[in-house]
């Protein structure tokens, strides 16, 4: 076993199960890789090296358990997911040193499946951002080119997976926060249907949009992760009772004849860079060669989707983040003179700029006299956005679109202009409004070597379908390789 | 920001003044520096201007979609259960005594 960290999760899990690779070897290899790369990419806020090795040794002593699909597989999770044995901050000062008393549902599921959780990934504070520059602790760099952002908000997760620090990671996606960093770092990322995965223990940003999902190095790895985390959880009332199908069954398809893939015209218009367009066009040609038919579809409310998304997200955020008051946990200001000052100073000191901006905007759109014009209006447009997606998906099996209008940009380039960053979510946030599943996968490298991603958007709860089509496409597209080979 | 503003007015004048920012900060329990107030006024105004694109969409008769949940929500029985111990709940408190969270004197 020469280079353990360049194996796929599927290959590693299989080798672990057969005893060809021990849990300790797999864990030690990832920890070694973290030591080699972390100084440069800053993907992790916390690493539990000792705990991971201890757990791996214990598992090795007991031997592989075939009932556990991720037995001995080292993974990481975004720091928005609470973990009972590791601090959890959501990359915010307001939660510095916070030690949760329980595991998120998805973390419970990972542990039950035999995964070894190495550490917690950096992110934009409270998942608010598209670059991972908004972390209160560190700026994560893109493993393909460390001058570039890794995307965000799950940028730490994407960078860890791309750099071989782990075999997969869990992120969360409110407006593109799994798919866009996956795309910028050349990984595969899946945002499941709203309700497919429990949000219990996910630190809430916008509760009607948030969804936990995997980032991994290929489609099959993503399917294996989803199989572990999908399912009903009574502790999240928005968690769906819908049965969980076998996500692996449809993988390896090579013939897409009879399949129709919709291309939403609004996602290929003004604003899409030529570089990304070229990469997507190649993928469309590949789909045709696999027998799929493509057709243009229209989603006319797209032009208002970003504004709708931001109103909904910020309104929900301003409400969700009211819990950080310096009383029960988290940062508290020194010597407040009264309760008001305890609240206002703790929050001023604890929250970063972007978080304050979104809380303020959320407060504005929910305030007296503005509620109907902004929040209610946005909820109405949200219904139109969703209905248009569902009508388009009536005519085709899935939709294909770019993930982002451009490839990853240089660190520091947009930081003073919040509106510019918002516009970068144009192709991802409408899918959250519509609550649909979407699989982001790499389709090409740009001339400068930056990964380009596309997304396959499915019908509600049709994750198996987009994973199947995604695996066919992945198998037929030339591999973009990995930043490990490049180095 | 006038409290009794009606919806028709604001659409044409969505500028968020420094005074509005102060008021919003008060509602959101945030203390802002002078510099923050000025910067947020500028940034929030440009974002709110951008949001006016919503007015280009005809939503008459459209029912708002606040939650995308499709299944029937199952309510649990309203029975109190012990999920955490008092010690666990108090473990992260910035200030506490044996049994309570401590805050500055209120009355």
Image (spheres, grey):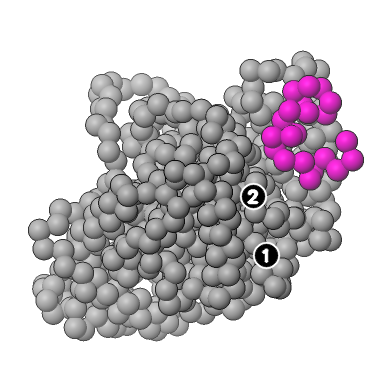
Image point 37% across, 44% down: which residue? A459
Residue A389: image location, x then y, percent: 32, 54
When asked about the image quadrant of residue A51, the answer is top right
When asked about the image quadrant of residue B14, the answer is bottom left
Q: Is residue A323 visible?
A: no
Q: Which residues are magenta?
A: A1-21
Q: Is residue A452 left or right of residue B22?
A: right
Helix, strand or loop at mark 2: helix
Helix, strand or loop at mark 1: strand
Q: Using the image, name the chain to which the residue with label 1 belongs.
A: A
Quadrant containing the N terminus of chain A in the rendered view: top right
Q: Circle 1 sits on which residue?
A: A445
Q: Is residue A460 visible?
A: yes
Residue A383: image location, x then y, percent: 24, 54
A340 is within the stretch colored magenta: no
Residue B12: image location, x then y, percent: 19, 83
Answer above or below: position of A63 versus B95: above
Q: Circle 2 sits on which residue?
A: A476
Q: Main secondary structure of the magenta part?
A: helix
In the image, A433 versus B107, the foreground residue is: A433
Q: Using the image, name the chain to which the residue with label 2 belongs.
A: A
Image point 16% across, 68% down: which residue? B58
A9 is within the stretch colored magenta: yes
Q: Is residue A299 left or right of residue A231?
A: left
When asked about the image quadrant of residue A231, the answer is top left
Give the mark nearer the N terminus: 2 vs 1.
1
In the image, A144 versus A357, the foreground residue is: A144
Residue B55: image location, x then y, percent: 20, 73
């Amino acid at each position: 076993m020469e280079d353990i960290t360049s194996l796929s999760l599927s290959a590693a899990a299989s080798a672990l199960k057969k005893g060809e690779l021990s849990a300790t070897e797999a864990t030690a290899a990832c920890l070694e890789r973290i030591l080699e790369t972390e100084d440069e990419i800053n993907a992790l806020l916390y690493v539990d090296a000792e705990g991971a090795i201890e757990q791996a040794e214990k598992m090795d002593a007991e031997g592989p358990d075939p009932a556990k699909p991720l037995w001995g597989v080292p993974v990481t999770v975004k720091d928005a997911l609470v973990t009972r044995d590791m601090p959890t901050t959501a990359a915010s000062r307001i939660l510095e040193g916070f030690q949760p008393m329980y595991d998120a549902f998805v973390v419970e599921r990972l542990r039950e499946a035999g995964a070894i959780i190495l550490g917690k990934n950096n992110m934009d504070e409270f998942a608010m951002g598209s670059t991972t520059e908004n972390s209160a602790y560190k700026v994560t760099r893109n493993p393909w080119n460390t001058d570039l952002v890794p995307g965000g908000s799950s940028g730490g997760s994407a960078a860890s997976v791309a750099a071989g620090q782990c075999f997969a990671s869990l992120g969360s996606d409110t407006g593109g926060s799994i798919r866009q960093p996956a795309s910028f770092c050349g990984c595969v990322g899946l945002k499941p249907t709203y309700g497919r995965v429990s949000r219990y223990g996910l630190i809430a940003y916008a509760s009607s949009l948030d969804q936990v999902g995997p980032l991994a190095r290929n489609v099959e790895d993503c399917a294996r992760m989803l199989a572990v985390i999908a399912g009903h959880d009574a502790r999240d009332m928005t968690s769906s009772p819908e049965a969980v199908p076998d996500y692996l069954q449809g993988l390896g398809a090579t013939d897409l004849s009879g399949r129709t893939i919709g291309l939403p015209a609004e996602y290929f218009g003004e604003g899409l860079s030529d570089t990304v367009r070229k990469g997507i066009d190649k993928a469309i040609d590949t789909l045709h060669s696999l027998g799929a038919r493509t057709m243009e579809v229209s989603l006319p409310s797209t032009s208002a989707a970003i504004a709708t998304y931001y109103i909904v997200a910020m309104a929900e955020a301003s409400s969700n983040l009211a819990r950080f008051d310096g009383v029960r946990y988290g940062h508290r200001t020194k010597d407040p003179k009264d309760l008001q000052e305890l609240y206002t100073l703790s929050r001023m000191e604890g929250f970063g700029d972007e978080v304050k901006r979104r809380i303020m905007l959320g407060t504005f759109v929910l305030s007296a006299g503005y509620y109907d014009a902004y929040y209610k209006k946005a909820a109405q447009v949200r219904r139109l956005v969703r209905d248009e997606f569902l009508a388009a998906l009536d005519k085709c099996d899935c939709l294909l679109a770019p993930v982002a209008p451009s490839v990853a940009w240089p660190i520091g380039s947009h930081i003073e202009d919040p509106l510019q960053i918002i516009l970068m979510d144009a192709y991802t946030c409408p899918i959250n409004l519509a609550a649909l599943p979407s699989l982001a996968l790499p389709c090409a490298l740009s001339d400068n070597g930056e990964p380009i991603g596309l997304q396959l958007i499915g019908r509600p709860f049709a994750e198996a379908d987009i994973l199947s089509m995604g695996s066919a496409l992945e198998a037929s597209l030339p591999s973009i390789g990995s930043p490990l080979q490049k180095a | 920001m006038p409290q009794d503003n009606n919806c028709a007015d604001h659409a044409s004048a969505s500028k968020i003044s420094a005074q509005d920012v102060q008021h919003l900060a008060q509602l959101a329990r945030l203390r802002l520096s002078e510099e923050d107030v000025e910067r947020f006024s500028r940034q929030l105004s440009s974002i709110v201007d951008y949001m006016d694109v919503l007015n280009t969409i005809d939503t008459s008769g459209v029912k708002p979609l606040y939650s995308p949940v499709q299944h029937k929500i199952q309510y649990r029985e309203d029975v109190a259960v012990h999920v955490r111990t008092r010690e666990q709940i108090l473990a992260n408190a910035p200030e506490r005594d044996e049994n309570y969270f401590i805050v500055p004197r209120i009355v």
